[in-house]
Image: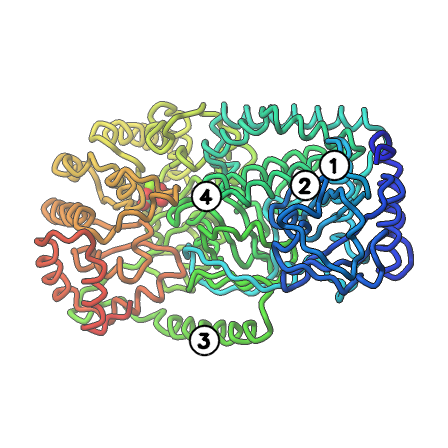
Amino acid sequence: MPASVGAPRQMLRRLREVMAEHESAQARLDKVVMLIASNIVAEVCSLYLRRRDGSLELVATEGLNVEAVHNTHLKPGEGLVGLVAEQAEPKQFADAQHHPAFSYRPETGEEIYHSFVGVPILRGGHTIGVLTVQNRTMRQYSDEEVEALQTTAMVIAETLASGGIISDEVTAETRREATARFTGVPISEGVALGHVVLHEPRIVVTRLIAEDVELERKRLQQAIEELTGQIDTMMERGDLARAGEHHEVLEAFRMFAHDHGWRRRLDEALGTGLTAEAAVQRVRNDTRARMLRMPDQRFRDRLHDIDDLSNRLLRFLSGGTETAATGDLPEDAIVVARTMGPAELLDYDRQRLRGLVLEEGGANSHVAIVARALGLAAITQCKGALETVEPGDAAILDAEGGELHLRPTQELVSAYVDKVQFRARRQAQYAALRDVPAVTLDGQRIGLNINAGLLFDLPHLDQSGADGIGLFRTELQFMISATFPRLEQQMRLYRSILDSAGDRPVVFRSLDVGGDKVIPYFRAGAEENPALGWRAIRMALDRPALFRTQIRALLRAAQGRELQVMLPMISEVAELRTARELIDKEVMLLKRHGRPEPSKLMVGAMIEVPALLWQLDSLLPLTDFVSVGSNDLVQFLFAADRGNDRVSERFDVLSPPVLRALRQIVEAAARHETPLTLCGEMAGRPLEAMTVIGLGFRSISMAPASVGPIKAMVLSLDAGKLGQRLDALLAGDETSLREDLKRFAAENGVQV
Ligand code: PEP
Ligand code: MG
């Protein structure tokens, strides 16, 4: 083997050439093993590939009996070859035949060979085959020799994967063909049939063998510097949500990026003649293989970090750092991501987007809200999907049942086509309710409004038959812009919204940024707890020019029409007062310039900070309306980050503490005759919306797609009867009332 140590590159290059020759697959494989054996001065070199049933088949050999080819199969874990495959790491034995795992196969004639070294052929951390070398003498193979063999195995793996070399019956990796099913939590209902797009494209390494090792070393060094620089900047800037990262993830990146072991392994891989890209790929495969075998789930979770980090590094090396949004999308894209920020989702061409699959993130996170606004089928917490999907895979996303089917069978596709048709019929039934007033069985008129944030939301107002826009999230315009939208631009958007809404009311919420809503061009500085930090009205009051510009734009857009402005994240009465003063100043300015004023100006507050619960009697007289932001209110009541899926679903919104808080608000609003609504995500879920109405809310605001189902629920509900049931339930001490409320709905024929 020593011949290979100094110069494996020529061999690798030759190996690639052989693989690309116009010969039968078998002939090429035969040449491959011959080439390796001759280069490394070994008597035997054999190649085993994994079959669909998991067994390893001898597919080519130099040195063993040729009759054994395709006849020798080792069950998973059987023999030394099985051991290498199972443990996914190199193994060597000076006296192989006396190893307890040795499995004697007379047809191979291997009894005369004593020393053995086997290395796994890895793809995505999974063993797809084993490459072995044997010698007659009892010898010890050096680390360099084993390393060179691993590199050879990698080149074989990449060449197999890039297609062509292996015919079906000789079989290599079959993951691409296998169907797979994953479960997740629905974010936005819908069923999508389409094709997978990876939000962060994986770089396919095509250039494997280095022309100039020193040059590759420099390229890698530079890419690592750029990568660590990017991570440091992201951490400093607090640009976490935009990049879709959590602090913890970035910390893990940073740890890996500075890890000496990782860098040393990269260096060793480079030393065997690989390009920088191939070295990254090789180390990623080895690390993945090691981590996949670790029993502790925490290590396995770190797989993502290694993948992400390697991907980023590969993107730096290839010069492409964009997400898939900027590339060519199929007509029916189902985007799969570990996580992403709301603005990143908005970067995609809406016409081509069918679905969104996230591995992490809560169902009330802002990216989830944007997904709902876009009417995408979307699920989150779909663990393991990223590891299995290949770009371009056919997929069915069932965001009703919370399932992702990859590479579905024809039968499954047919079943889902039926389901899609069924959904379309149900949508038609909802559409038929469009002009039916939302009145409960006991005669309560319920205002059903939509949440919106961009111009493309507006057609939903007509389609859904909603009463108005209960929450217009003005920050979305800011989040998708490259720079601060100027007064003119803001005004234009608000005017178009009011024009389209006609005489239906629109509630414009003033800029609510901070937390996970990041404006890329506005650096606010890193915060330990951004959800509790400098955001929304706090930012507006500290930077009054920003706030006043927005108010000016709203006032000018609304001339002669009613204008409703809602202030987010109010925590104390003084904030409302100060904000009102700023608004009044803008009104004065308008008057002074003789510009037309809105016909009516109403200023409201969001109730989403728990402290307001004990200030309602002083707050409500100062407001024209209030709206409960239940997403934030619940996050703060339970101290559970809405964007963190470990905790976001931990506490039930249908639990006494939340419902008692809501009832307290209903009672206070009634005392002060203040118009009240609720615009958090719970308003769009039938069982939750039913409960809210049972508590006394007579107006709610939701994602447009929810209006139909919610109206159907309202039409089948006796609000008074539910109110009585809730009185009784809230007097008890149950942790969650969900089951009781479901029972109420079932007993009373409420459509939830
Ligand atoms: C809320 O917090 O419930 C809300 C409606 O506002 P956002 O989701 O935009 O924070
Ligand atoms: Mg909020």
Which secondary structure, mark 1?
helix
Camera-side mark, 3 or 1: 1
Measured from the top left, where is residue 592 in percent x and y? 35, 29
Q: Nearer the viewer, residue 132 or 172?
A: 132
Instruction: Answer yes or no: is residue 677 visible.
Output: yes
Expressed as whole percent of the image width and height from the top left, the position of residue 154 reads 74, 43
The picture quadrant where one finds residue 90 is top right
Q: Position of residue 178 (x, y in %)?
A: 61, 63
Residues at circles 2 and 4 in contact by the CB criterion of under 8 Å = no
Which residue matches tag 1? 146
Q: Amino acid at mark 2?
A: Pro
Q: Residue at x 44, y 76 (%)?
A: 425
Q: Quadrant of ligand 2?
A: top left
How far is the residue under mark 2 from the one under mark 4? 24 Å
Q: Residue at x 34, y 30 (%)?
A: 586
The quadrant of the rendering that contains the C terminus is: bottom left
Label 2 or label 3, whichever lies nearer to me, is 2
Q: Quadrant of residue 149?
A: top right
Q: Which residue is mark 3?
A: 422
Do residues under tags 3 and 1 come within 8 Å of each other at their CB atoms? no
Callout in the foreground (2, 4): 2
Q: Nearer the viewer, mark 4 or mark 1?
A: 1
Q: Comparing marks 3 and 4, which lies closer to the viewer?
A: 4
Dot 2 corresponds to which residue?
Answer: 90
Q: Which mark is residue 297?
A: 4
Labels 2 and 1: the sequence-earlier one: 2
Q: Nearer the viewer, residue 301 or 648?
A: 301
Task: Name which residue type carries label 3.
Answer: Phe
State the residue at coordinates (54%, 72%): 412
Callouts 2 and 1 close, C-beta under 8 Å: yes
Neighbor class of circle 3 (other Cα within 10 Å; few <14, some 14-19, many 20+) is few
